[in-house]
Image (spheres, rainbow, N blue to C red):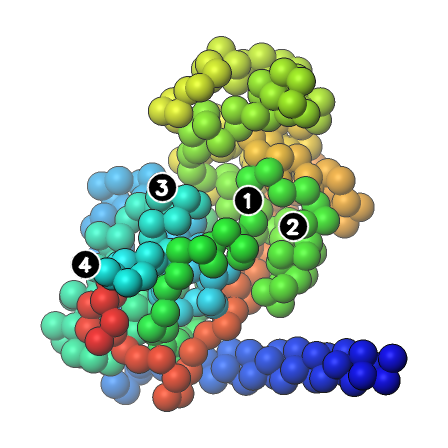
Amino acid sequence: MAFQKFVSVLFLQLLLVLLVLDCANASALKLGFYSKTCPRAEAVVTKTTSYFVSRSPSLAAALLRMHFHDCFVRGCDASVLLNSTKINQAEKVSIPNLSLRGFEVIDAAKSAVEKICPGVVSCADILTLVARDAVSMIYGPYWEVPTGRRDGRVSIAFETLTNLPPPFANITQLKANFASKGLNVKDLVVLSGGHTIGVSRCSTISTRLYNFTGKGDTDPKLDRNYAANLKKKCKPGDTKTILEMDPGSFKSFDEDYYTVVAKRRGLFQSDAALLDDVETKAYVQLQAITHGATFAQDFAASMVKMGQIGVLTGQAGEIRKHCALVN
């Protein structure tokens, strides 16, 4: 019994140390980190992002998703950008990341910055800035990004499965997942609002439509009319048809997502799960009723928090020369 108590205390102390280290690294980030070493860096990243997003606005959702997937696995260290090697399968090739796109935007921004300031600006900072710029370019909120992140050297495909919240997660799983990253329940419901832009595929909701409990049934939490409409678009086994995550409004960053969820028309089970918790449900209903009165500012604040998850600073990690390769 004494030994078990000792182990428990030791475990709690270790968690506390890791939390303190995480906070210390996050506090090392600051606005204008490159103001002296590469003063044009952020302007160059914005210009590059604008070039791509203006030609293909749907990239905004893809780049926001990429940033999310990076931060939730090993922290915001650009590990999602690394290629696999002969001896390691990287995050890029994991099932949740096979549909990621927009890597060319990050590569172009990195290349442009390297021309003026070689070896100074990290891929992790570039990805964070690109996500912010992409959202603001489709009339979403703009937020100041503290910089100073460094790039990680490790990327393991399997880690995505244990760190990224799946689209079929329930509210208990979602809250636990976000809490493990230092994000609270409000961050969960606010960042879920990122689903206001982007698309998915029928394969993602096939079980929800056709075999929810293994008896050929449909998820009862899904609005009947919406379910019927989805079944017209998605036949059993369909893996190619694309679906809007926020029907009728998927190209614009707005509060309509919450109106959709409130009507039980959220595409994923994880969207519907927001109605299963008192706090998240209240936020959904508030934004739906007030037409997103606080959504933009809330989203900006939660994005800043997310961008500080597990960051590497100081002498940790490295500044990659090429975002897909360790030095």
Q: Which numbered circle lies on residue 166? A: 1
Question: Residue under circle 3?
Answer: 99
| N-terminal label among 2 and 4 | 4
User: Would you say 213 lies left or right of 106 here?
Assistant: right
Q: Which amino acid does label 4 sit on?
A: Ala
The C terminus appears in which quarter of the rendering?
Answer: bottom left
Horizontal and vertical percent position of residue 202: 45, 25
Q: Residue at x 47, y 67 (%)?
A: 74
User: Would you say 88 lies left or right of 294 here?
Assistant: left
Q: Residues within 10 Å of mark 1 (few under 14, many from 20)?
A: some
Q: How far apart are marks 3 and 4 (CA)?
A: 20 Å
Q: Residue at x 16, y 78 (%)?
A: 118
Q: Is residue 32 visible?
A: no
Give the answer, above or below, for where 147 lies relative to 87: below
Query: Of discs 3 and 4, which sits in the foreground?
Result: 3
Question: Residue under circle 4?
Answer: 108
Q: Residue at x 36, y 73 (%)?
A: 152
Q: Give the image quarter of residue 217.
A: top right
| N-terminal label among 3 and 4 | 3
| N-terminal label among 1 and 3 | 3
Q: Is mark 3 on a helix, strand or loop?
A: loop
Q: How crowded is mark 3: few (under 14 residues within 10 Å), some or many (20 or more)?
A: few
Q: Distance between the residues labelled 2 and 1?
A: 9 Å
Q: What residue type is labelled 1?
A: Pro
| N-terminal label among 3 and 2 | 3
Question: Residue under circle 2?
Answer: 174
